[in-house]
Amino acid sequence: MKSPARVEYRVRASVGAELYERILREAAARRLSVSHCIRADLQELYAIRDELSRPIATTTPGGGGRSSLVHRLLAETETRLAADLGRQLDELGALRNAVRLLELMLDRQYLGLMLYLPDIPADDDDTRARGALRRYEAWKEAVDQLLRRSDATR
């Protein structure tokens, strides 16, 4: 028995310069004529659309049950997101520990400083307050400079 004759229809379309250049590059890379390349691309596009539009029964790895492709892809995406979230939580924990360590180091440094600074006589309260304020402002400026230098190197 003879197979039915293959019927082909001509389709004309206009495209912009950017898309036209892309089609030419694709056709050259695949060593096809522009017409054959467009036909192949459309066939691939519609095959992908058909596959994604209907649930595909696949065997699940764990129990031999059946599941749709979409459900499997969603499960894989959820697994990747959970792993990424876990990694980020680990990094956040490490950062919190580093900040806590710096806080403790600063506390110990301040305590050590206070242990070894001599007391200023009570009659020099104004002098002590002015000196403390001056040192405090100088300390804040030094911290600001360190932060700016740190931000510039990032």
Image: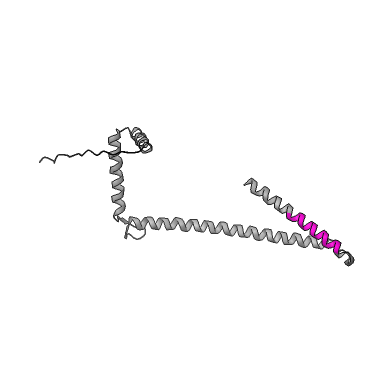
Q: Is residue 118 visible?
A: no
The residue at the far bottom in this view is 122
The quadrant in which residue 16 appears is: top left
**Which residue is painted at 53% across and 57% down in the image?**
88
Residue 138 placement, left or right of 103: right
Q: Is residue 91 visible?
A: yes
**Which residue is painted at 76% across and 56% down in the image?**
137
Closer to the camera in the image, 151 or 2: 151
Closer to the camera in the image, 56 or 153: 153
Is residue 10 found inside the magenta-colored segment of the image?
no
Residue 24 at x, y percent in the picture: 35, 34
Residue 76 at x, y percent in the picture: 40, 56
**Which residue is painted at 57% across and 58% down in the image?**
92
Residue 45 at x, y percent in the picture: 31, 45
The quadrant in which residue 135 appears is: bottom right
Q: Is residue 21 above or below residue 134?
A: above
